[in-house]
Structures are given as C-alpha cells and as structure tokens.
Image (cartoon, grey):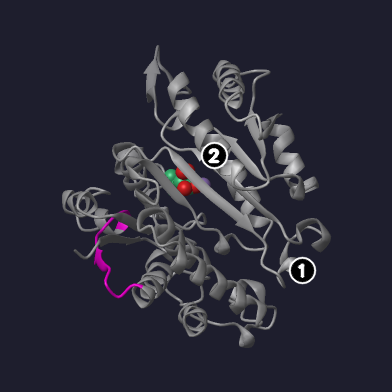
Amino acid sequence: MAETIAVLPGDGIGPEVTHAAAAILRFVRPDVRCVEGLAGAVALERGLGALPDETRSLCDRSAAILFGSVGHPDYDGKPLSERPEFALFLLRRDYELFANLRPVRVFPGLEDESTLKPDLVRGLDLVVVRELTGGIYYGTPKEQRCIDGVDEAVDTMIYRAPEVERIARVAFELARTRKKRLTSVDKQNILETSRLWRRVVERVGLDYRDVSCEHLLVDNAAMQLVRRPGHFDVIVTENMFGDILSDEAAILTGSIGTLPSASLGTRGTPGKQFGLYEPVGGTAPDIAGRNVANPTAAILSAAMLLRHSLADDANATRIERAVEETYAAGARTAEFVHDASTALSTTAFADAVAARL
Ligand code: IPM
Ligand code: MN
C-alpha cells in the first residue's frame, strides 16, 4: 500500500520550500502519496483553528508529516491558542514528538559564508538533540493574570525523570553511532529541573560507558559553540535551551536556511517511526513569496523523513549527496551571494539538486 505523507506548508516561505522538498521526495519515491493540509496562519485566515480537524485526521493516517513553517506578524500579541505557532505546539504534544534532532553541517565550499573564521567551522558536523514536549513550553500554570490590580504572567518549567531519561537515551544512542561524545546542557547552578536533568543523564550514562559525557551550563555552552564549535558532536538539552542553541548552531553554517530537523516520538519502530520534519529556520516574512528562499533545509528534512519514517536510507543518502554536490558545484541561493544576478531561485536550486539525483 502506498504510504501517505501529510504535507503542511504553512506560512511565509513555508509553501515555497516545502513544495520544492515534496517535489524531490516524489522524484525519488513516486509511490509515496503526498497530501496537502492547512496549518498555521493560512488556516486561521480561513476562520479555522491553527490545526484544523481535517489536518489532524490527515496526519493520523499518514506515515509522517513534511512541515514548512508557521507564524505571521499579524498575530503578535495574541494568546498562544490563537497564534499560528499553536499548530506546531499541538502536533508535537499530541503525537508525543519528544525527540527533536537538528543536525548542523557545514558543506564544503561554504566555510567562507560563516560569520566565524572559516577554520573554525570547516567540516563542522554536530547534532542538537532537543527535548520537545516538556519543560517551560508545556508546564502549567501558564497564563497571564491580574492579582490585586497588578498584571503578572507565569510559565512553568517542569521535567519528570522519565522524560529526561528517554531523551537522554536517544542522545546516547545517536552519539554511539558518531564520535561517541555527548554534551549535556543545563543550568544546574540555578534550576531544580536542571539538577534533575543532570542526575538522570549521569545515571543513563552508566549504560553507555563507551560514550564520553560532559555537562555544560547553558551560558557557557552558548559561548563554546561560537568559540570552538568543532568540539561538539552530540548536544542534548531541554526544550527552551535547545530552541535557542539550535538557532545559534544553525547560523554557524552561514545560513539558517540549510538546517533540517526531525521530531520523533513513540509511534512506530526504528526506521519506521512517525515523525514531523521541518526546516529549523522560520517563516522569513521579509522574503516570502519571492521564490528566493533557500530550500536546502526543507529538502534535507525530506531526506530525514525517508530515513526515519520510510526506512529508506538509500534515498535519504542520495538526496544528501545531491545537495552536497550542488553546493560543491557552486550553486547558491540569494543569502549566500553578493551579486544578486548570480543567485539561484528556490525552484532553480531545487532543480539543480534534482538534476544530480
Ligand atoms: C522551532 C521554532 C518553534 C519553537 C516555534 C515556531 C514555536 O522556533 O521549532 O525552533 O519555538 O519550538
Ligand atoms: Mn526555534
């Protein structure tokens, strides 16, 4: 039976880059059925919720979700439940997509595009493993209120040991397949949740004695990432630290438009897991609709989808190689070039990748 993939392009540059990625996915796997659904501001504009029921049932019957990005300045100031981002919030929570993998790689030839010295980022290859369904994003109480005439707001950072344990296991397992170096990031000098985090990671580490595990405080980790990024192999951290550090790690490559991600949960078996795949970068409203956005992150997210949800490592690797070769051949989208006339459009870059498949 043909596998169904829910394609949720969302807002901003989401549709452009997601359509480019879906085309590549269909190119390597014509048997896969891509079905589009609404999520984010495009759904809100139609008077629906950020994640309409129809989209949810599409996801229920799909093997994976290929996601674009959600968000729109019109909704700034609105409560979370009325914002486009609520779609992601619900998908992550309701499908229990607790493990967010964000691989950061600098493609050969792009070293000079980094804001860091080329020598610091040459050959950079690390993965941020971000806990995605706990911590301050989801803890309650979470509200704005007025007490004795004074406005106040509260968010709650809470972790339970099993939540830390399962993400730690994902990170240790991943480190085992790589350089066997894990960095766990917390703020244990201040936060109780971090003291629990560190204790649990250390305990899980006893089952992975072949992996070296160090602990860094998040402020120091943020600094080390720009000071000696090559030091890192796998970084594991809680939800909000991971959100912040993964943007920082992403830009080491010179463009946030190159970073894919996979959000995996509890459904399925290794290689055949249900997951959500999305670029790390956001909606980029300033360049939306102009066919100039870099589709690399979306294309590499489709490769991760093949690997983790369709057990198709061969095609995943094929796409990754094609992207690498495309860069090696000098193809660049607008953010990388100083002379705009030499820049490839979103569709032209995707075509260049497809030509190498
Ligand atoms: C991300 C994004 C989301 C997050 C937003 C859009 C809710 O920044 O995936 O990193 O904060 O997790
Ligand atoms: Mn983010």
Which residue is at 40% across, 30% downward?
138
Report the Cα–Cα distance between label 2 and label 1.
33 Å
Secondary structure, magenta segment, majority class: loop
Q: Quadrant of residue 15?
A: bottom left
Q: Secondary structure at mark 2?
A: helix
Question: Looking at this view, is 234 or 277 the one in front?
Answer: 234
Which residue is at 44% across, 26% downward?
163
* Residue type at tag 1: Asp
| Residue with the mark numbered 1 | 112
Number of residue marks: 2
The question of residue 297 being in magenta is answered with no
Q: Quadrant of residue 223?
A: top right
Specify the quadrant that holds the N terminus. Answer: bottom left
* Residue type at tag 2: Glu
Task: Judge depth for marks 2 and 1 and give the one in front.
Answer: 2
Is there CB contact under 8 Å for labels 2 and 1?
no
Q: Quadrant of residue 347?
A: bottom left
Q: Is residue 349 above or below residue 341?
A: above
Instruction: Write the start and end of the magenta stretch as one range.
Output: 29-41
Which residue is at 29% across, 59% downward?
42
Using the rendered image of the protein, determine whether residue 78 is visible from the camera's viewpoint.
no
Residue 113, image x and y in percent? 72, 67
Question: Looking at this view, is 11 or 144 the one in front?
Answer: 11
Residue 264, image x and y in percent? 40, 44
Residue 187, image x and y in percent? 64, 24
Mark 2: few/some/many CA within 10 Å (<14, 14-19, 20+): some
Q: Left or right: 221 with respect to 285?
A: right
